[in-house]
Structures are given as structure tokens and as C-alpha cells.
Image: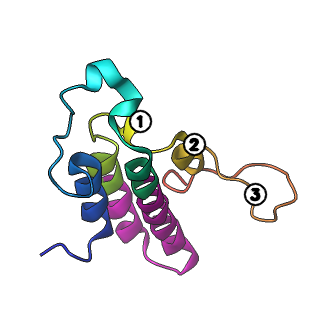
């Protein structure tokens, strides 16, 4: 069972929705575009996506070995970034930390490399 696997849970949520009954690509997606996914579903998926990214990022802070982190980064790319219509299924702000990572001191300065790239 994959009950405690956050990456699997996120992929499943993104593909089939919270009830696990939605098709990966809704039949009316071409017409409705971003509106084919409810705001509640987007919020749920966005929260889980940010949690998964935070967990992967935290591995470097807690001294996890690089191979483990690389495995999770690879899984994230293969299992999450390949979900059909991903950009419609989460809020755009969910991707901010994948593209740029603000300085840790909170006082401005240079942005660090994104957590899944560094």
C-alpha cells in the first residue's frame, strides 16, 4: 500500500481528484480550460504540492544524503511534472518556489537556487 507516500498521494490527487473518480483529462477541458477543476480541488492539490516540495527541500537541511534527495527530485519530475493539465490543477503560486527561492534571511538579497535544482 502507498498510504503514506506523499508523492503517490499527490499524483493520485492530481490525476483523479479527491474522490478518485475524475478522468485525468476531463471531457470538457478543451472548452472550460482552467475552470474544468474546482477552486477547492486546486487548493487541495496546491497545498499538497507545496508540502511535497517542502519535504524534499528539508532533506538538505536535516543532513539527508544526496542520493536520497536526488531520487525524490527525480520522482517529482517524473510523477508530478508530467501530470496532464498540471498547470490547471494547481494555483500558479504553487510553482513559485520551483522557479525561484527567496533568500533565507528575509531581508532581500540574492535568490537561492530552487529547492529541486540546488
- The residues colored magenta run 46-74
Q: Name the residue: 53% across, 72% down.
A: 58
Badge 1 vs badge 3, beta-carbon distance below 8 Å: no
Rate crowding at label 2 as few (under 14), some (14 to 19) or many (20 or more) other CA atoms within 10 Å: few
Residue 16 lies, with reference to residue 70, above or below; the image says above
SS at mark 1?
A: helix
Closest to the observer, 2 or 24: 24
Name of the residue lying farthest toward the left? 1
Q: Which mark is residue 99?
A: 2
Main secondary structure type of the part rendered in magenta: helix
Q: Is residue 79 magenta?
A: no
Here the colouring is rainbow
- Residue shown at 21% from the left, 58% from the top: 19
Rounded to the nearest whole Å, what is the CA distance between mark 1 and mark 3? 25 Å
Q: Nearer the viewer, residue 26 or 70?
A: 26
Give the mark toward the camera: 1 or 3. Answer: 1
Examine the structure image and report whether residue 50 is included in the region drawn in magenta. yes
Element class at badge 2:
helix
Give the numbered dot on residue 87.
1
- How far apart marks 3 and 2 lie (CA) works out to 13 Å
Amino acid at each position: 500500500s502507498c498510504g503514506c507516500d506523499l508523492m503517490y498521494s499527490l499524483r493520485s490527487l492530481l490525476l483523479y481528484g479527491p474522490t478518485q473518480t475524475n478522468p485525468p483529462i476531463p471531457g470538457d477541458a478543451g472548452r472550460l480550460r482552467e475552470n474544468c477543476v474546482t477552486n477547492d480541488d486546486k487548493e487541495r492539490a496546491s497545498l499538497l504540492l507545496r508540502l511535497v516540495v517542502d519535504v524534499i527541500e528539508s532533506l538538505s537541511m536535516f543532513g539527508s544524503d544526496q542520493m536520497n534527495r536526488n531520487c525524490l527530485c527525480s520522482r517529482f519530475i517524473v510523477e508530478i511534472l508530467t501530470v496532464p493539465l498540471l498547470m490547471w490543477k494547481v494555483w500558479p503560486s504553487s510553482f513559485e518556489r520551483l522557479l525561484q527561492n527567496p533568500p533565507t534571511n528575509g531581508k532581500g538579497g540574492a535568490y537561492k537556487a530552487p529547492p529541486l535544482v540546488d
